[in-house]
Amino acid sequence: MQEEVVKVLDAYVEKYTGDLISKLKFLQTEGWNLLAQYDNLKLVNEDPEFHGEVSCLTHSLEVVNLLQKLFNFLFFQEKSEKIEIELLQKAVSVLPVPIDRHLNSVIGKKTRKELLFFACMFHDIGKLHNFVDMMPEVKEKNIKGIARFISHADYGKFYFDTELDNINEAIKSNEQKLAKEKDDVKKQFFQRALSYLTNLKNEFESRNEFFKKIELEEEERNYIAFLIGSHMDMLNFYVQFQTAYSHKNDNEGSEAMKTLIKNLLKKLDVYKSLYIDCILLNFCDNLESVLSSNREQTSLYLFLQTCFLVYLNGDGLHAGGTIVFKDNFMVFEPGKPVIKYNMGALFTKFSKPEAIKIKDIITKSADPKSALKEAGYDGDMIMGLISQ
């Protein structure tokens, strides 16, 4: 096991304690050793387009380092040159309950803080399922549906999943795709995916034994598996936010923000109490990518703030509110109250054609009373009639 891995584990235990993290260094079982598999990430390179020229192990450890710097700020108000403190303060200030209190709450028998650290550390272990050597042929033939680290979030989730059925379903799905596939490159892809999944299936019992000895219970494993399986969703939403941010003063930006809010609300319904945890893992993952590839950071912090505003204002957003850019800050704006009129009352006072005409004037005007007067009607009388 690499010294740098031990250093990261020790740094967490020294500052925050944690039986799970301290046991990781020493525990192995016959047939399976989690850290030995984790160390194999040094053999896999990240995509330089997003992460710089680093191994998956280096990326993962730096994500964990950033999470610790985030923890240090939230719990001890320590500052770091890698964290834009002002922007971070703005992002977390919208929450009514401090994040440190949320992170100190317990799932199973362990704090979210320790379990989130664990999930963050292993979020990319599914990248051991790597097709980098296939990429030149994939690009040359313009083959759709194969990416360098396709499905790595799902395969990473399977390391910690408590249900063998989930792996069996993934195997069955890939077997069906392989049986229908005619392209040789895609056949190779599905064959290798099946090999990987079969290995995970064969290791299932030894993994269960390992997690039993490390005292990682079912509820805690499910939390870790959920966060790892969900972390690419939030990355995709950040891409949507970047579109909104780069076009914030035109219709394209407005439409992109509407789409983002709609998607985040759906995820809030699914994630429930795990929404904030998923956001924090995603933030650290994205921040490492931004820093290692020398891209601007501001939009990422504004995205973090937007995610928190969605969490805080779900009901208001469903009721027609929105989130807008204002002075380099994200702000929730409530929707205008919808006034309900009794349009049926028009048909008791006017003929059907005239009632329809008056209804059309009212529904299309921002100031119905004035519009009715301009059309020659008694605006006060009509508005009084339908408001009763």
Image: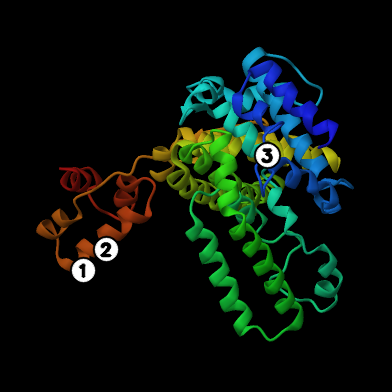
On screen, residue 337 versus residue 64, left or right, reads left
Secondary structure, mark 2, is helix
The answer to whether one can see residue 254 in this image is no
At x 68%, y 43%, the residue is 34
Kindly identify which residue carries mark 2.
357
Residue type, numbered disc 1: Pro
Q: Of discs 3 and 2, which sits in the foreground?
A: 3
- Residue 263: percent from the left, percent from the top? 52, 51
Residue extending farthest to the bottom is 182
Where is the N terminus found, in terms of image quarters?
A: top right
Contact flag, marks 2 and 1 (Cβ < 8 Å) = yes
Q: Nearer the viewer, residue 345 or 258?
A: 258
91 shown above or below 44? above
Disc 1, SS:
helix
User: Regarding mark 3 in the picture, which secondary structure is present there?
Assistant: loop
Mark 3 or 1: in front is: 3
**127 or 317, nearer to the observer:** 127
Q: Which residue is mark 3?
A: 28
Percent x, y for residue 288? 77, 38
Q: Which residue is mark 1?
A: 353
Q: Position of residue 273 (x, y in %)?
A: 45, 36
